[in-house]
Image (cartoon, rainbow, N blue to C red):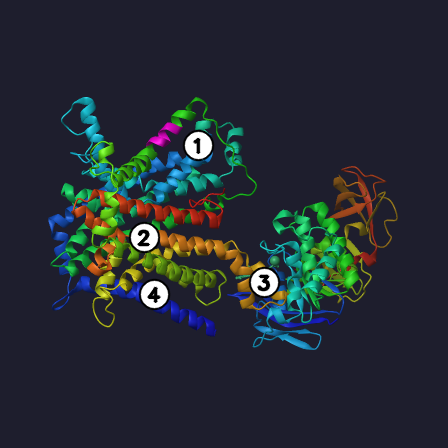
Amino acid sequence: MPGVILKALTKRYGDVGAVDGLSLEIKPGELLALLGPSGCGKTTTLRLVAGFLAPEAGEIWVGDRCLSTPTSVVPPERRRMAMIFQSYALWPHMTVAQNVAYGLRFKPGLSRGDREARAREMLRVVQLAGYEARYPGELSGGQQQRVAVARALVVEPEILLLDEPLSNLDANLREEMRFEIRRLHETFGITTLYVTHDQAEAMVISDRIAVLQAGRVAQAGTADDLYHRPRTRFVAEFIGRTNVVEGVAASRDTVTRGTVRLRVASGELEPGARVVLSIRPHQLRLGAPGDATDATNALRGTVRRTAFLGDTVDYEIAIAGSDLVLRAAAPPTPRFEIGAAVGVRIDPAGCVPLADGD
Amino acid sequence: MDRSIAVWVGAALALVVLIALPLGWLAYLSVSGEHGATLGHYREAFADPALQKALWNTVVLAFWTGLVSVAIGAPLAWLTARTDVPARGLIRGLVLASFVTPPFLGAFAWVMLAGPNAGILNTLWRSVTGAEEPLLNIFTMPGLVFVVAIYTFPYVYIMVANTLALIASDLEEAAAILGAGRLAVARTVTLPMVLPALASGFILAVLQALALFGSPAILALPAGFHTVTTQIWSLFQFPPKVEQAAAFSIPLLLATALLLQVQKRLLGRRGYAAVGGKGGQRRTIPLGPWRWPALAACLLVMSAAIFLPYGVLAKGAFVRAWAQPLSRDNLTLGNFAFTFFEYGSTRAAIVNTLELAVLTACVGAAMVALLSYVTNRRLVVGHQLVAFLVLAPVVVPGVVLAVGLFIAYTRPPFVLYGTLWILFLAYLTKEMPVGYAQADATFRAIPADLEDAGRVLGAGRLRILREITAPLAKSGIIAAWCFIFIGVIRELSASILLFTPSTKVMSVVIFDLKEEGQFGAISVLGLVMLALTFATVALVQAALGRDVLGARR
Ligand SMILES: Nc1ncnc2c1ncn2[C@@H]1O[C@H](COP(=O)(O)OP(=O)(O)O)[C@@H](O)[C@H]1O
Ligand SMILES: [Mg+2]
């Protein structure tokens, strides 16, 4: 099972750099999610990998084969990949069985019987046994999705590409299919590039996530990495919610903003420099206002707004002696009402300095 | 980009032969005098009071045709698209029939129905009332407008009905819940939303009337007046004044181009295009006691366009004297014998027509399939330009195209005049836009994903074309073939300038027969033409699984 390496890929449409010097490695057998807001170049990247587009610069390698350079592109049909489309792209004039068996026609040494048997077996794996003779138009959205998955997997591709495959499903089905795709990945272990704009989906499904911003990889890592150690403001805000606090480094491990002083765990700041911190809402511990005011990262504030979410309560807290308004996610008890004075403590490990200011 | 070059060379050649050469010559001849460039032909043409009159007549005809078409087409569209008027399917079918009826056949039929002397309706009127004067005289401007409009209103109908079918009732109900009464909803929501379609249908009707040759030739000439098209035709009669005809063609060309531009603007405006929301339902409006009167009104229109004309043609084909009552000794099959065996040019003309229709349809369908595939899948650089050029002939009225082709292909290096090829070129050019529109819609409805999905799995481009694209596009391309075929067998306005005695086609023979007053034979040929047309329409419907007028099943 080979991996995929994208080297400084660039693809422009007119003046727009849809993909702009993108480098990325997908390890053998890994499921990597390409995550980013709409228009950031995910589909373009995927179509570059599939060979539908030629890059203007950069290279695409699969294992030790170089598949794309600006001057030569191995056509899609010779890349040994499979792709699952947002629209499913099932052929309406073929039955489910014919759709699934289609890709096997291009495998040498398979008789018609073999092909049918494999297609039937794959349909069983995606829990669609018995639907062979139906036409795609006669299936529900979820079933069509499964046919598309079967059609891609049955050819035993080296690389599997998926472009927002779940975005046409309703919420329940989407949840179910996430686990289904993860299960199939664990069964077959195919190196997979999974495009999505849904961060929850990316976190559930993938081994690693690459966050895309304006045609480049902003950060790649495990969901845990990206959540706890975001490198840029864009990543911090795109993966989960966060508080962004701008300030100045007073020492190697302290940031000040007006009267507020915050210790950070990393301790590699450059004194005097501008610093942007990301603080996740659940890193804020709320307590009575008088509790240990001189302890590390202890602040005081007033509750401005609350929202009860069941497991947690969302607070918006105006920090005393500062213009800071922080969001906190705290357990339902103890409860603080709007207007109540609260004490806020933040673990220095939860204050993550970001690499850039924007 | 080697394939780009091949496509472009092919397209450029076709373009030169079909459009650039004819229109180039047309423009050139219109300004070339014995001593270099001159505006003399224009001056001559436009200073001539007779020609000025023809120009004015065309404006009157086109404008009134547009209005009457809207007055008929819009209510009919609303009734069938939105209300519970009975027999909606039948009405749609009849509108379709009117759409495909060759207008000049309708004109002939109305000569038999409402000619001032022998017209059947007038005879009836005289015998019932004892009056001396005829009730109707079809050989007048109002008569002409009427006969043109009853075959032109389907353009308005199609535009409006298809738009109404897209406007979800939600939009109207959203206004109603805010307090708008029924009339207010119609005025403030429905009407503004169909207005672009209405205006655009009006313009299409005007364009038809501008370009029409047959009906004015049949109705206006006996009445002693000309329109631009008949004027151009008469400039071509011996001794031909080709330069003047050319000068006279240019304004018609420009007017058409301008109107189409306006129409495109109207349709391109936001709001109209955004109408196609998802999931919105369209509820029918109960007419209550008005159901049957509404149906009666629809059928009245349809009897003018279909029942009476078809009836009189059928009668004319089977009787000795069409003006006399149907009686046993008036019945005959003699007209058929005369048409097919005695009258000189009929059989050759039918063969010519069918040959040309099949050839044009096959070549045309292949071309539009290829071109629309190329433009839809953006296979070459400058694909937008290809699409624009293929659609360009829309602005060229048949008569004008014929003048251009005549000039271009009566002189070396290409002497095609006198052969069927010049007719073939005329038909191919004229039908290309219709065929392209159909083929384009076909490929548009086949997402590129379906092809890409096959590519990734290992199928090459040609194989995808054969196994995925072709099966999915087949019915749409068959429909394009049929549209071209129907267009060719009814074509008159270009044929009338391009035929020679050995290259007559059916429509030209019908026109000849008029000169000889052979209404029996006209009726017979008319029925043959209608039979061919409806057989082809049936084929389209089977291929597309929906009716030709375009709305969903
Ligand atoms: N065929 C195209 N022509 C012109 N611009 C395109 C085309 N495809 C994509 N783009 C542009 O490239 C950018 C990235 O598009 P895409 O890769 O589809 O984004 P995503 O899939 O992340 O939403 C967008 O700005 C989009 O408008
Ligand atoms: Mg996309």
Frontmost residue, B383 versus B503: B503
Frontmost residue, B397 versus A20: B397
- Residue B13 found in image quarter: bottom left
* Number of other residues with Cα within 10 Å of mark 1, as a class: few under 14, some 14 to 19, many 20 or more: few
Inter-mark Cα distance, 4 to 1: 46 Å
> Three-letter amino acid code at disc 3?
Asp
> Three-letter amino acid code at disc 2?
Ile
**N-terminal-most mark, 3 or 1:** 1
Residue at point 20% right, 48% down? Answer: B513
**N-terminal-most mark, 4 or 2:** 4
B346 lies left or right of B390:
left
Q: Nearer the viewer, mark 4 or mark 1?
A: 1
Magenta highlight: main SS: helix
Whether residues under marks 2 and 1 lie with C-beta atoms below 8 angstroms apart, the answer is: no
> Residue B15 has which mark?
4
Which region shows up in magenta?
A: B295-300
Q: Secondary structure at mark 3?
A: helix
Residue identifier under label 3: B452
